[in-house]
Amino acid sequence: MTLTHNDLLFSPTRDGVPSSDDNFTANDLVAAQDALETEAREVLGETGNQCTYDLGYIKQPLYACLTCLNNCAVCAACSVACHGDHDLVELFNRRDFQCECGTRRMGAGSFCSLSPRTDAPISEGNRHDKNFRNEFCICGRLYDPATETDSMYQCIVCEDWLHHECLLGSHSDLNDAPLGPDDFDQIICDGCVKTNRHGVRSMVLERYAGRKGTGVMVIGGEGGREVLGRAILEDDDQEVTIEMEAAATAAPADATSTTTEKRKADSPKLEGDLEPAPKKLRTDNASTSKLSSSTPSILPSTASVLPTPSAESSQPPAVSAPPSAAGECKAPLPFAPGEVSPLMKLESEGRKLNVYLEEGWMMRWCRCSKCAPSFYDLPYFLEEEEVYEPPEDPDAQKSTLELGMEALARMPREQAIEGAMAFQGLSERLKAYLRPLAATGTTITKEIIDEFFEREKEARGQAGAD
């Protein structure tokens, strides 16, 4: 008796799963099922069984549903429990979003199977964009993990995903771009810079981007292939010099005087220095997020919410600074009158304003009392953001067989015995049905199995009529 690949819908590319050229037994099928379930756990992780709607607007993994109305996005738990057979687009982590399962945005009569929620009010604070229609990057290409070959990176501000080729002019596999995936940790896309989204350009980047030693890099220069603003130099013996603006308390004699700090790229960490923010990825802990057909992954989350200003004060709250920045401003010097910033120069030349943040970027911003308000709408530039993780499921690592045996053990004894006897009877009838086919070497197809169960259904119907 031979079972084919097409009949069983198994992929021969997965380890432990038999291919269409194999003859295999029931034990092989059980092992194959275990392999598929292990793969599913690695890819999906723990989705939990609790909808996140009641948690409000949080940063969480989201799935846009193309089957339901209005391309709503749902939490990981609802993507499995309520939308498991729908056409879903994985959006990875998105900030400030409330699960939309069972809300009126999905249309009248929508409900969430994980909660008693039906036709809940629309979450007006949710922000939707083209990603929710499975359109990504400035090219607007539909994302298909089965065919996508280029690396993709998530803009830390707008959270859109952009292709390596659309950012840097060539496919990531060619390794001929001015920057490679290992050369930067985060990106801020051209669109966010040009539109000054959340003040990211006027409040922060105009002063930092492209300036020597900041690690806030742009690509320009002759031929448009020069990387400006590196903090980590390829030659470890070179020194990195960053011009700093002296705080009034540090240089009372001359308000325009500057301080210059010199640090070698490989110099040891000084007392009081902070470690760079840890990089977190779903699969390999690499720093740069990459979407591909084989290894979906996500960018590190880099924000936590700043405290809300009190009613008594309209001023933004102060941001806690690292000990090393407590008493002086360490931002690059303001530009002199008539001096053009690297961003303005690139813009005048018609170039893209994509900004690439080098590893350790979060610790390079000045956080003095003068600079801290610049980050009021960009808190994720300063502190790592909390990302919702579902409660740990004690059954998450168990196979379907183990869960079934545990459920059987919890059944009343009489009911369990009746179920076991019914299963044994079904097994004997299936063997009797398949035995003649095995003797002739007939391939078992879906139609043959369907015919068996159709006969079973007719037999039950006749028994009920009698």
Image (cartoon, helix red, strand yellow):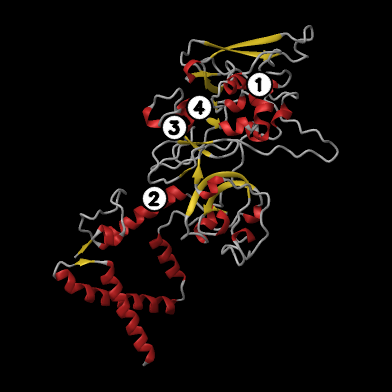
At horizontal 41% and vertical 52% (from top left) the residue drawn is 40
Quadrant of the rendering where the N terminus is positioned: bottom left
Q: Residues within 10 Å of mark 1 (few under 14, many from 20)?
A: many
Residue 91 at x, y percent in the picture: 52, 46
Q: Residues within 10 Å of mark 2 (few under 14, many from 20)?
A: some
Q: Label 2 to label 1, Cα distance in Å?
A: 46 Å
Distance from Cα at disc 3 to Cα at disc 1 = 27 Å
CB atoms of marks 3 and 1 within 8 Å:
no
Instruction: Specify few, some or many for label 4: CA neighbours under 10 Å numbering under 14, 14-19, or 20 or more.
Output: many
**Which quadrant would the C terminus be assigned to in this image?**
bottom left
Amino acid of disc 1? Arg
Q: If you read the primary sequence from the N terminus, does the residue marked by circle 3 or circle 2 appear first?
A: 2
Amino acid under disc 3? Glu
Q: Residue 207: which disc?
A: 1
Q: Are marks 4 and 3 in contact (CB under 8 Å)?
A: no
Measure the C-alpha gap from mark 3 to mark 2: 30 Å
* Helix, strand or loop at mark 3: helix
Foreground of the two, 161 or 414 = 161
